C-alpha cells in the first residue's frame, strides 16, 4: 500500500547537478522577485522579506541559489551580496548567475552571448554579489548570433581563471546545446552541466527534445515557472466551478486544458490534504530528468508552503492521473517513431497482407 506521508526528499538530500560532482538541493531558491525595480511586473517583495526567505532556506539546509545579472536591473545580485556577507558561509552555497540580457541598457556590446559581454557581465556580477567566483554561470538565452565556438571557448577561459566553477545554459534549442557540448568535448573545454527552461504540468514542451537531450548528455534540468505563473495553484477555476471565486495573477490566460488540469490538481489536493501548490511541485519533483525546480517567491508563506512539497510522495496513481489530464502533442518525429524501442511502431512493421 502506498505511503503518502513518506517524504519524497528534503533540502539536504543533495543531488548531483548533471554529470558533475557538484551537489545541490532538490529545490533551488529563485530570486528574480528580490528587488524593487520590477515591482510592476513581479509584485512587491521587500528587502526584509527577501532576506528572511534567504536565511530560512539556507538555515534549513538549502544550498542552491539562482540569480542573474539582469534581475531587477542588478538589484537582486546587490541584495544577495549583502545577504551573503551578513549570513556568512558563502563557500557552502552553490550560487548560479547568468549573462546575456542587456545591463545597462543602451550599449550594443552589453547584451548577447559574445565574449566581451560575457567577461564584463561576470566582473559586474562578482562585484554586486561580493564574491570572487560563481559556482554555475549560465548563458541566459540564445542570441542567434554568437558562434558556438566563441561561447564555449570564452566560458572555458572563465573556468580556467577560477572565477567560474561550472557552466550552464538557459532558454536555448536542444540542437544548439548539443552542438555546443560536442564542440567542448572535441576541444577539451568545459561543457554545460545544467539547463534551465520553462516546464510545468501545463507546459511540457521541454519533454519533446530538451529533456531527452539533457538526460542523454548529462545536463541537470532546473525548470522555472513550475507553477505556471500561478495557473495551477487553484486560484483560477472555471467560472461555473463549485470552487470558483478565488482570483489569481492578472493577465493569466486559461484554456480548457488548463482548467481541466486545475480541476484534477484540486481533486488530488482534497484527497491528500495537501495544498494545490504542493501537489504540483511534488509532481514536478517526480518527473524524469528533473534535478532542481526553481522556486519563485515573494512571501515567507510561499516558501513555507513550497518546502512542504517535499514532505510527502504522491502515489503512482496520482502521478498517472495528472499525466493523463496534462497530455500533450509530442509532434513529429516522436509521434511517428515513438519515444523508446518499446513504443516504436516500426520495429516489427511489415507490409500488410493484401485483402
Image: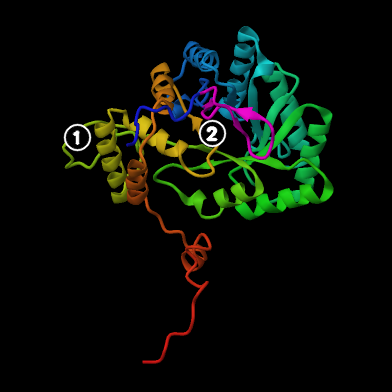
Residue on which the image places disc 2: 292
Along the polypeptide, which appears first: circle 2 or circle 1?
1
Residue plotted at (72% across, 19% down): 127
Q: Is residue 263 in the magenta section?
A: no
Residue on which the image places disc 1: 243
The prevailing secondary structure element of the residues shown in magenta is loop
Residue 104 visible at all: no
Label 1: few (<14), some (14–19) or many (≥20) C-alpha neighbours in 10 Å: some
Name the side, left or right, on which 148 lies relative to 75. Answer: right
Magenta range: 11-30
Name the side, left or right, on which 142 lies relative to 28. Answer: right
Residue plotted at (32% across, 32% down): 276
Coordinates of residue 132 in the picture (x, y in percent): 75, 20
Coordinates of residue 321 in the picture (x, y in percent): 32, 46
Of circles 2 and 1, the one toward us is 2
Q: Please say if 238 is above or below 72.
A: below
Give the secondary structure at mark 2.
Answer: loop
Question: Quarter-wise, where is residue 278 in the image?
Answer: top left
Amino acid at each position: 500500500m502506498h505511503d503518502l506521508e513518506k517524504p519524497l526528499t528534503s533540502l539536504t538530500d543533495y543531488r548531483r547537478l548533471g554529470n558533475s560532482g557538484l551537489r545541490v538541493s532538490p529545490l533551488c531558491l529563485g530570486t528574480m522577485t528580490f528587488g524593487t525595480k520590477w515591482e510592476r511586473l513581479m509584485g512587491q517583495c521587500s528587502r526584509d522579506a527577501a532576506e528572511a526567505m534567504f536565511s530560512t532556506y539556507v538555515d534549513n539546509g538549502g544550498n542552491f541559489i539562482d540569480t542573474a545579472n539582469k534581475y531587477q536591473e542588478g538589484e537582486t545580485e546587490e541584495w544577495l551580496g549583502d545577504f551573503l556577507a551578513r549570513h556568512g558561509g558563502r563557500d557552502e552555497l552553490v550560487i548560479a548567475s547568468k549573462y546575456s540580457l542587456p545591463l545597462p541598457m543602451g550599449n550594443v556590446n552589453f547584451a548577447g552571448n559574445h565574449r566581451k559581454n560575457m567577461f564584463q557581465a561576470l566582473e559586474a556580477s562578482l562585484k554586486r554579489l561580493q564574491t570572487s567566483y560563481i559556482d554555475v554561470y549560465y548563458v541566459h538565452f540564445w542570441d542567434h548570433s554568437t558562434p558556438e565556438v566563441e561561447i564555449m571557448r570564452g566560458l572555458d577561459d572563465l573556468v580556467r581563471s577560477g572565477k567560474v566553477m561550472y557552466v550552464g545554459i538557459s532558454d536555448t534549442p536542444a540542437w544548439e546545446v548539443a552542438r555546443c557540448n560536442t564542440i567542448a568535448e572535441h576541444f577539451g573545454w568545459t561543457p554545460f552541466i545544467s539547463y534551465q527552461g520553462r516546464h510545468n504540468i501545463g507546459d511540457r514542451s521541454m519533454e519533446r527534445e530538451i529533456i531527452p537531450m539533457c538526460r542523454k548528455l548529462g545536463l541537470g534540468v532546473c525548470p522555472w515557472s513550475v507553477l505556471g505563473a500561478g495557473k495551477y495553484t487553484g486560484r483560477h477555476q472555471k467560472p461555473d466551478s463549485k470552487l470558483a471565486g478565488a482570483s489569481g495573477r492578472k493577465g493569466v490566460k486559461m484554456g480548457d486544458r488548463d482548467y481541466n488540469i486545475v480541476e484534477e490538481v484540486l481533486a488530488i489536493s482534497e484527497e491528500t490534504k495537501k495544498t494545490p501548490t504542493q501537489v504540483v511541485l511534488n509532481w514536478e519533483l517526480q518527473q524524469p530528468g528533473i534535478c532542481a525546480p526553481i522556486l519563485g517567491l515573494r512571501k515567507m508563506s510561499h516558501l513555507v508552503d513550497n518546502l512542504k512539497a517535499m514532505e510527502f510522495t504522491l502515489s503512482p496513481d496520482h502521478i498517472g492521473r495528472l499525466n493523463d489530464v496534462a497530455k500533450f502533442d509530442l509532434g513529429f518525429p516522436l509521434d511517428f517513431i515513438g519515444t523508446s524501442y518499446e513504443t516504436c511502431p516500426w520495429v516489427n512493421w511489415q507490409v500488410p497482407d493484401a485483402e
